[in-house]
Amino acid sequence: MAYFDGIKVGDKVWSFEHGWGIVKELVYNLPYPIGVLFNNNQYETFTLDGKKEQFCNQTLFWDEIKFEIPTRPKAELKECKYLIDLSNCKVSKNMPIGCEDKIGLFRNDKETAKKALKQIKRYTRLLALRDQECLDSRGYEFVYGLEQFVIFRNLNKIYSIKPTKHIYSPTDIYFKTKEDAKKICDVLNSGRFDLEGE
């Protein structure tokens, strides 16, 4: 039994490509017996299964097919074997039960997890140093268009200041004033604080 068994001239049908149309002719001895004139004045022929070509998907239907166009799927983190345990500053073997709130703190191999922990510690230590030593920059976050400052370390392991207004990096720590950034550079360059320390 074909999808369009019983179809008649004058029946309304709907196509993915052209929308609504009217069956204008039926010639059963042809491979594409259903002739449809669509509201956009396009004329197409279809099989009794609603196909424009024998080996393609059906595109003609009795009624409009309503569907939602899917949005692009979000990236999903699938790293799950080693937990970067921030409360104990160590890497632990897989702890999947009850760790739903720790998404992003897992890695699939121990060495990568250790490197990530080292980066997280460095970042949070610098953030804590800024918030402790620089009252104007305490809790400061990037604001597009305003002059603000980040610090970086060159090949000679010297910390310097770089101004920024329009370029945001999620791995940078921002300072509201140049004086605050310079103060932290001086502390780090003098060796009075080690970002890698325990």
Image (cartoon, rainbow, N blue to C red):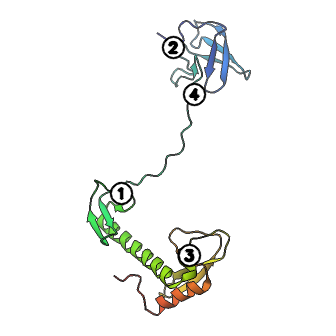
Please provide percent x and percent y for residue 105: 37, 62
* Residue 191 appears left or right of 39: left
Tag 3 secondary structure: loop
Tag 1 secondary structure: loop
- The reply to whether discs 2 and 3 touch (Cβ–Cβ < 8 Å) is no
**Image quadrant assignment for residue 148:** bottom right
**Disc count in the image?**
4
Please provide percent x and percent y for residue 167: 61, 69
Q: Residues within 10 Å of mark 3 (few under 14, many from 20)?
A: many
Q: Which mark is residue 174?
A: 3
- Identify the mark nearer the N-term, 1 or 3: 1
Give the spatial CA distance, label 2 vs label 3.
Answer: 64 Å
Please provide percent x and percent y for residue 1: 46, 9
- The reply to whether discs 1 and 2 touch (Cβ–Cβ < 8 Å) is no
**Residue for badge 2:** 3
> Of the residues shown, which amino acid type is indicated by label 1?
Glu
Which residue is found at the position 59% from the left and 70% from the top? 142
Give the spatial CA distance, label 1 vs label 2.
Answer: 47 Å
Q: Which residue occupies the foreground of this view, 140 or 104?
A: 140
User: Which residue, as the protein is rendered here, is positioned at the far bottom?
Assistant: 190
Tag 4 secondary structure: loop
Name above or below for residue 90 compared with residue 50.
below
- Identify the mark nearer the N-term, 4 or 2: 2
> Of the residues shown, which amino acid type is indicated by label 4?
Lys
Which residue is found at the position 55% from the left and 31% from the top? 67
> Of the residues shown, which amino acid type is indicated by label 2?
Tyr
**Residue for badge 4:** 66
> Of the residues shown, which amino acid type is indicated by label 3?
Tyr
Give the spatial CA distance, label 1 vs label 3.
Answer: 29 Å
